Amino acid sequence: MKAKNGFIKNLRYLCLISIIALGLITIVGCNGGNGDGTTTTTPPEVNTPPTATITSPSDGSTYTQGDAISFSGTGEDAEDGTLTGSSLVWTSSIDGQIGTGSAFTKSDLSVGTHTVTLTATDSDGATGSDSVSIESVEEAQYVVEVYDPDKAYPGTTFFTDSSGDPRVVEVDMNGNVIWEYYLTQEMIPQGAIVGFDAELLPNDHIILTISNTGLFEIDREGNILWSYLDPDVSHDADLLANGNILYVFGNNDGVDDAAVKEVNRDGEIVWEWHLKNHYLERFPPEVYAWEGWGHCNAVQRLSDGTTMVSIRNFWLTTIVDSGGNIVREYDWSSYGECYPHEPQIYEDDGTMIVGLQIESLYAVVKIDLETGEELWTYPKEGLRTTRDCDILPNGNVLLTTVDSGGTPDYFEDDISTLIEVTPDGEIVWQLKLAGIPVGRNPGWFFKAERIPQDFLWK
C-alpha cells in the first residue's frame, strides 16, 4: 500500500501545483507536505475598464470646413492611472481615425455631421469611450443674384451669420467680405449658439447681443471694450443717448423674468419691465408659451422716453412709459398667427415696419404710427421667416429672411437671404448664402443693416 499511498500523495501535489498555476486557489497553510494542508479559494482579480472624457469640442458645435478644431480629452484607469499617447484614440464616424493622445488640432474634417469618439485603452486591453456630435459645413459663400446699382441704396451690408463659426460680416454690394469678426470662446462658452445680434454704433464700435451669454462692445480690431454677462438676454440691444444699454430677454423666458432691462456701464440694472405685471391673466403661460412665455424679440427707446417692446407670442408691439405703464398696443393678430419680429419705429415720418411670419400673407407690413393704418406690404410668397426689416434712406426696404426654395413643406432647400426691394416691390439687390441650407432653423442670418458709403470708419 505504500506505493499506492505515495502515488495518491504525489497526485494531490500535482493537482495542487496545477491549480495554483492557474491562479484558482491560494495556499494558506500546510502540514509539511503530508497532503492534508488547508486552502481557501478566491475569485480571479477583475480589471476595471478606463474612463474617457472629451473636453473639446463641445457637443453640438458647428465649424466651417478648414477651421482648425481643437480636440482634447482625458483617459483615467484605476490600475494604470492617467492614460496618454496611443492609449487614447480619436475616431470620426465619417473620417475614421483622426488622432491620438490627449490633445491635437485638425483642420481637414470632411463636410457632414460627425460623431467623434475618444476611446481609452488600458494595459489589459479594456476600453472606455466618450462621444460628441459636431458638424463641419462648407465655407459660407455670399452670392449676389440681383444688383441694380441705379435703384439699390449704395453702401455695405452688415449682418450676423451663424451658419458655421458664428461671425459678424460686412460685405460690399457684390457680396465680397470686407470685414468680419468671429465670436470668441469667451462669448460662447457653451459651444453652441442660439442666436446673436450685432449693432454698428456711430463711433464704429459694435454691440454684440449673444443669447445665454450677455452683451459685448468691441472695436474693429476685435478688442473687447466692455461686457455685461447675463444669460437672460436675447435678440436685441440698443445703445441709449446716456451710454446705457437697453436689451430684451425672450429666449425661453419665464413668468418671473424681466422682459426688458436697462444696464449702465458699471453693470447696474437701472430700469426693467415685466410682462407679468400686465399680461398674466390675458395671456396665460400654459396657453401662449412657445420658446418662452412672451418671447420678446425687439426693444427701442423713443425720443419721448417711452419704450417700444415687441412681444412675439402675444402678437403685440407695446409702448410703455418710464413707469412701466402701457401707453399703446399694436395688435398684429388680424394677420393670423404671424409672430411679429423686430418692429422698428421711424419717428421722423411717423411709421412702423415689422416682419411677420407663419400664417401671415405678408413678410413685411408698414403702418401709420398714429392711426395704425396699413401703408405698405411685401408678400410672403416664396419666403419663410422674415426676422428683420429696415427702411433705407431712399425708401427701399432691406429684408433679412429665408427663401423657401419654392417648396414650402420641404426645408432642405431653404436658403438664408437678404433682399432689398423698392416701394413698388421690385427686387433691386439680393444676396444668398450658397451651399448651406437652413433646414428647420429659422435662418442663419438674424439681422442686417445697410451702412452708407460715407460712414465714419470709411
Image (cartoon, rainbow, N blue to C red):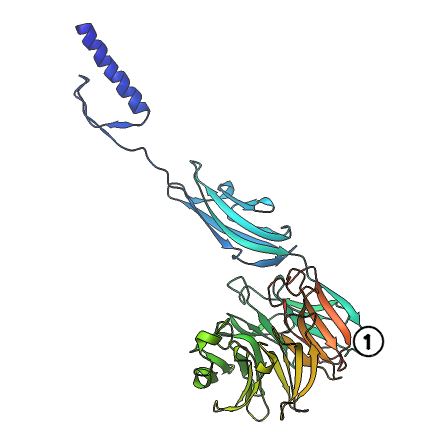
Residue at 54 percent across and 54 percent down: it is 133
Image quadrant containing the C terminus: bottom right
Instruction: Give the quarter of the image for residue 257.
Output: bottom left
Residue 22 falls in image quadrant: top left
Q: Position of residue 288 (x, y in %)?
A: 48, 76
Q: What amino acid does circle 1 point to?
A: Pro
**Depth check: 396 or 243 in front?**
396
Which of the 4 quarters of the picture holds residue 344?
A: bottom right
Residue 434 percent location from the top left of the image: 71, 62
Residue 380: percent from left, percent from top? 68, 74
Number of marks in picture: 1
| Residue 267 seen by the camera | no
> Which residue corresponds to mark 1?
149
Q: Is residue 255 left or right of residue 376?
A: left
Q: Residue at (77%, 81%) from the top-left corner?
A: 424
Vertical side of 368 occupied by 65: above or below:
above
Rendered view: 269 above or below 383: below
Query: Which quarter of the rendered picture does the N terminus lie within?
Result: top left
> In this rendering, would 35 be left or right of 246?
left
Figure check: 379 above or below 21: below
